[in-house]
Amino acid sequence: MNDISKKKIHYPIKEHLRQYLEEYSREISLPIKYEDLNHYENAISLYDDAGKDTMWETVFYSQSDMDEIHDGLCRVYALLKTEGDTEVTEHLYVNRIDFCPFGNSKPFRIRVTNRFNDNYDYFYVKKADASRVYGLELEHILSPNRIFYIVDGNTIVEDHIAGIPGDVFINSWLEDPQLNKIRLAKEFVKFNERCFVRLLGDMRSYNYVVDVTPDFDAIQYRIRAIDFDQQTYEGNKTMYLPQYFKDNNPIVEFVSNLLDPKTIRQYQKEERVMIANRIRVSRYRLKDLSDCLDNDTISPPEKVDQLKQELALHFNDETFLECESMGDILRTRLYNLMYDNRKVLAGD
């Protein structure tokens, strides 16, 4: 597999995408922006309970700035959770702000705590990027997961996606005697298929989480992407298949040992049918987003050319060769999925 791009190009949000965000209530005026959080005075490394460096830094602000920043962040949290009703957040306070200097969005992670019971929640403030916005929207429309985020200018605020980080799960949970192996294997197959259908790349193990939910008779699993910067960006089609990232090898081997090829194909088909159903339900919103993507640039021309060539060969479909942008490629990919699903329903 080719190496993933060392540094993804930043693509600003253009007017047509901005209008889409306003239409679907994603664009909201924020009381505090990403740039405001950059004015911290000091930072210390953040370690986990085992003493391992988390690659995050806890940042500190001057006394004169701290009250204003914390008040602004609580109001941002209210916008994210309660449509701006600050009355229900009066008992909340910000007790930690962490910064990650790595990655494309260089996020700030905000921990908001309840004064009465010390329960806490997280949200993120990041640099807005068109690729990430398209990724978040496609996740909201095409996956079984709902995504909550708001944008203001060059700032994007995202709700925390709860779950066990994929790398932690692989290292610590695969050997758990209570693990429901078949259900986990099935979910990874479906997650792999979702990423390939909607062309979400870079799903290395630390870019997704595993949501574990006890059910009445067994444990359920949901694998959820948490990084959307590589939405329809790479030219190599294997970048859109989590199974090809080497740090996912343990779970890929786990799946191979549990599921035969026929069962894997069944689960892949099930997921494609579910995505086709979501497309039908949200077809107008998806069309609006697709129109934006058709007129946008979120990948270099050489990557567009490589991906359309590889997908044409993979699906034996020369329609991909006519695509001129990543938006064209994604539209063709989804159209073909809908066409194949109609054949399945017709019994062909």
Image (cartoon, rainbow, N blue to C red):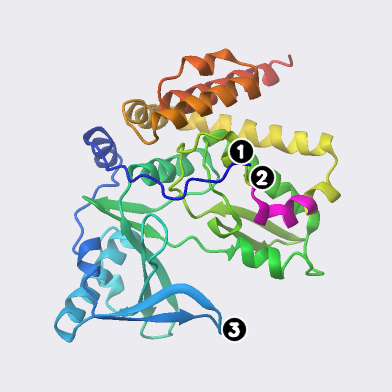
Which residue lies under the disc numbered 2? 244
Rounded to the nearest angstrom, the CA distance separating label 2 from label 3 is 30 Å
User: Residue 55: where, in percent of width, then height?
Assistant: 47, 72
Q: What's the magenta region?
A: 243-253
Q: Quadrant of residue 218?
A: bottom right
Residue 214 belongs to magenta span: no
Disc with the residue nearer the chain's start (1 vs 3): 3
Indicate which disc residue 238 carries. Answer: 1
Q: Residues within 10 Å of mark 3 (few under 14, many from 20)?
A: few
Q: Residues within 10 Å of mark 2 (few under 14, many from 20)?
A: some
- Nearer to us in this view, 36 or 187: 36
Disc with the residue nearer the chain's start (2 vs 3): 3
Q: Residue at x 36, y 56 (%)?
A: 105
Which residue lies under the disc numbered 3? 50
Relative to 332, is 71 above or below? Answer: below
Split into 4 quadrants, where in the image is the N terminus? top right
Rounded to the nearest angstrom, the CA distance separating label 1 from label 3 is 34 Å
Disc 1, disc 3: CB below 8 Å? Answer: no
Count of numbered tags: 3
User: Residue 142: where, in percent of width, then height?
Assistant: 51, 38
Disc 1, disc 2: CB below 8 Å? Answer: yes
Indicate the secondary structure of the residue bearing disc 3: loop
Q: Amino acid under label 2?
A: Tyr
Is 177 positioned to the left or the right of 151 in the image?
A: right
Main SS, magenta region, reads helix
Split into 4 quadrants, where in the image is the C terminus? top right
Indicate the secondary structure of the residue bearing disc 1: helix
Is residue 94 something one can see in this rendering? no
- Nearer to us in this view, 127 or 308: 308
Residue 245 belongs to magenta span: yes
Indicate the secondary structure of the residue bearing disc 2: helix
Rounded to the nearest angstrom, the CA distance separating label 1 from label 2 is 6 Å
